[in-house]
Structure formats: C-alpha cells, structure tokens
Image: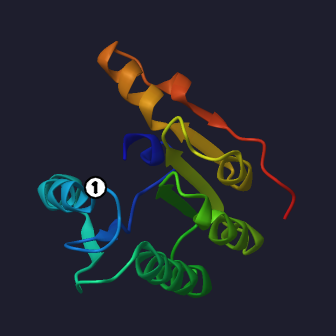
C-alpha cells in the first residue's frame, strides 16, 4: 500500500480471492490473511464464497469490477497483487484504456505479466528489503509491451 501511495491517493481497495473451499492452492491461508488484514488495510473483501468456485470465477469478478472502474473513470492507476499470468490480458486492456497498471508479484511472476504492466514490484524483494530497512529497490519500471 505504501508503494502505491507514492503515486497519489488510494481511493478504492479490494481483495479478491477464494474464501473457502475452492480449488486454489492455499485458499484457506489466503482467506485467513485477507480477513486479518481487511481492517488494517481497509480492504473491501470480494472473495468467492461458494463451494466449488475456482480461480476463474475470482478472475471474472475482478475483471468485471476493473472494467466498471475503467469506464466510470473513477481510477487513474490500478494496482494488482498477483503473480498469475492469466491477468495479463486485463492489464493490457486497462493500459489500452489509458490507465497505469502496477503489478506486485513474487519472484516467480511470469515475464508476460511483468511486461504487460507499467511497473512491477517484486514482493519477495520488497519483504527482504523492508527487514533490512529499505524498500525502493524492489519497485521498478517494467518494460511494458506495446498496446
């Protein structure tokens, strides 16, 4: 959240993920973390709660909300915390709509997602630097693909 705040006021914060059940690796850990962090980070949880829902259902929900925000003009910059390459088309579409997109992902984030965004922050490196007293070196302009 601190990195995004460097670019302006954070007006909308939402957390997308599988709440319970589902097919996502670590979904129960994610749900617990999201619930614990919601108050601290002022996140609005937008998690799939129906047993049997998949990552695809969560991505669809995220995409619909992002398109709504794009077309209503309520967001100038989008920040996505994900290492999932399936979100690269969404990132490209948001950029085509004239918005900046910052992606926060781990060391294993696919190159396609990194290339699609305006800036990428390696969260593993950010966590490491934060424990050492710094944090700016993990956040750099990516080399975005042409849109």
**Where residue 108 appears, x then y in whole percent?**
55, 39
- The answer to whether residue 17 is left or right of residue 88 is left
Q: At x 59% / y 66%, what residue is drawn? A: 87
Q: At x 22% / y 81%, what residue is drawn? A: 49
Is disc 1 surrounded by few (<14), some (14 to 19) or many (20+) residues within 10 Å? few
- The answer to whether residue 1 is left or right of residue 86 is left
Image quadrant where residue 73 sits: bottom right
**Where residue 51 appears, x then y in whole percent?**
23, 84
Q: In the rendered view, how is the structure colored?
A: rainbow
Secondary structure at badge 1 equals loop
Please determine whether, in this image, residue 24 is positioned above or below residue 6.
below
> Foreground: 54 or 46?
54
Please determine whether, in this image, residue 53 is positioned above or below residue 117.
below
Image quadrant where residue 14 sits: bottom left
**Where residue 140 appears, x then y in whole percent?**
63, 33
Residue at the farthest right position: 146
Please determine whether, in this image, residue 93 is positioned above or below residue 103.
below
**Where residue 132 appears, x then y in whole percent?**
34, 12
Q: At x 29% / y 74%, what residue is drawn? A: 22
In which quadrant will I find the C terminus? Answer: bottom right
- Tell me the residue that label 1 is attached to: 26
Q: At x 44% / y 36%, what residue is drawn? A: 123
């Amino acid at each position: 959240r601190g990195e995004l705040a460097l670019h302006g006021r954070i007006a909308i914060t939402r957390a997308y993920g599988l709440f319970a059940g589902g097919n996502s690796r670590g979904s129960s850990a994610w749900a617990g973390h999201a619930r614990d962090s919601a108050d601290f980070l002022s996140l609005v949880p937008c998690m799939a709660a129906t047993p049997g829902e998949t990552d695809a259902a969560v991505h669809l929900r995220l995409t619909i909300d992002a398109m709504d925000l794009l077309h209503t003009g309520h967001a100038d910059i989008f920040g996505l915390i994900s290492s999932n390459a399936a979100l690269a088309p969404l990132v490209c579409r948001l950029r085509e709509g004239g918005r900046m997109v910052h992606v926060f992902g781990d060391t294993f984030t696919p190159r396609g997602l990194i290339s699609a965004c305006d800036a990428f922050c390696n969260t593993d490196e950010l966590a490491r630097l934060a424990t050492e007293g710094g944090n700016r070196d993990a956040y750099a302009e990516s080399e975005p693909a042409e849109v």
